[in-house]
Image (spheres, rainbow, N blue to C red):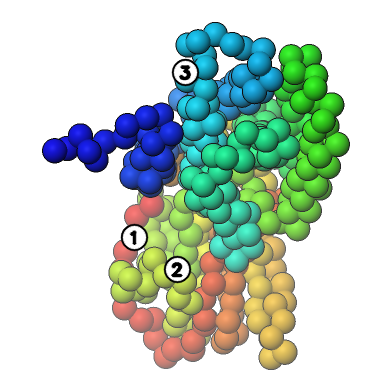
Amino acid sequence: MIRKYLPKNTEELIHWYERYVSPFALLGGFLLDNFVFLDRIDSLQSYILLTSYMALAAGGIVLIHLIETGRLRERMVLSVAPFVPVVIQFAFGGLFSGFLAVYSRSASVAVSWIFVVAIAALLIGNERFRQHYMKLPFQISVYFIVLFSFFIFFLPILFHRIGSLMFLLSGIATLFVTVLLLYAIRVLVPEVWKEERTRVARAVTVIFLMFNLLYFTNAIPPLPLALKNAGVYHSVTRVGDEYVLQAEPVPWYKRYLLYNTLFHREAGKPVHVFSAIYAPSGLNTPVLHQWQHKNEEGEWITESVVPFTISGGREGGYRGYSTKNALAEGKWRVNVLTKNGQIIGRVAFTVIAASSTPPVVEIRR
C-alpha cells in the first residue's frame, strides 16, 4: 500500500525530496545552524562547516560541466548526475542558512535589514533554484555571493581587525578564489568558459559593486561584532564581575517587539545606557555610544558621543555603559557604533518627566 506513495525513479525522487523533505530540512538546518553549529562564529566547527559547504558547491559546479560536456562518461557517474544540482542546492542552502544565522545576530533592524532580508530571500528561493544550477553564470553568481559573505566576517576574525580595509581585503580574497574556480573551468571545459565568460564577468561585476554599495551605506552588519544586550536604565553599578542594572518593568511581549521604551526621569537624575557587545577572542576595538535627541522638526540631533574600547572573547559580550544628565523630554536614541560609524545596534526610548523615580526591577548582567 505504502509503495505507491514512494518515488519510482530518480526524477521523481528529486521532486519528492523538494516537495516533502526540503521545507523541513530548511527549517531544521536553520535551527541547527543558529543554536548548535554556529553558536560562535569564531569557533573551529563554524569554519569547518562553512568551508565544507563551499568546497562541496565548487566541486559540484565543476562536476556538472564535466558531465554535460561528455568528459565524464563512467556509468556510475552518469547514474548520479541528476543528483549533482541537488547537492549544489544543498550546499548553498547550508551556506545561506548559516549566513542568515550569523548576520541576523549582528544586524541593526533599522539599518541592516536590507542585507539580512536579501540573505533570507536567497535561502528561501534556493529551494526552487535546482534547474538554474545547471547554468554557469547563475552558479558563479551565487558562489561569489557566498564567498564574499564568508570573507566579510572571516578576515576580521583572522586579523583581529575591523573596518573598511578588512572589507576591501574580503573583496580581493573573493575575486581571487572566484578566479581560481573559473580558471579550473576554463582548463577542464574550455567550450563552456568561452560561451559564458561575458555573462559571468558581467554578473560578478554587478554583484561586486552591489556589495560595495551596501557596505558603504552601512547596510551590511559590522561582523564579527554583535550586540548581545542593550537597554536604558535608572542605575548601573558594578558588583564584582556583574553589573547590577535598575530598569522599569516591561511586559514580556514588549521585549520581543519593536516598542519604544518609556523612561520616567526624575529631575536631576542621570540616564544610563548599557550594552554588551560580542567580539571574537583577540579582537580589541573602539566603539561609540552616540546620544541623539529628536527635535521639533523631526530631525535627530547628536548631543554627545561616548567612546570606549571593547575586548573580545567573553561569551555574553563586553559590557560597557554611558551616562547622560538632564535629558530633555521627548524621543531619544543611543546608537552603538563602530569607530567607522557602522551601527552595531540601537536603544530607542522616550523620556517623560516624573516627580519621583518609578518602581524598578533589578537585572544582573
Relative height, residue 357 to residue 305 (above, below): below
Q: Position of residue 119 (x, y in %)?
A: 58, 49
Amino acid at dot 2: Tyr
SS under mark 2? strand
SS under mark 3? helix
Q: Which residue is mark 1?
A: 363
Taking the image as drawn, is residue 242 in sight? Answer: yes
SS under mark 1? strand
* Location of residue 139 (image quadrant): top right
Q: Residue at x 50, y 27 (%)?
A: 82
Q: Nearer the viewer, residue 117 or 297?
A: 117
Amino acid at dot 1: Ile
Q: Position of residue 258 (x, y in %)?
A: 47, 72
Pointers 2 and 1 in contact (C-beta within 8 Å):
yes
Q: Which residue is mark 3?
A: 79
Which quadrant is home to the N terminus?
top left
Q: Quick one: label 2, few (<14), some, or many (20+) residues within 10 Å? A: many
Choose the circle earlier in sequence order: 3 or 2. Answer: 3
Pick out the residue farthest to the left: 1
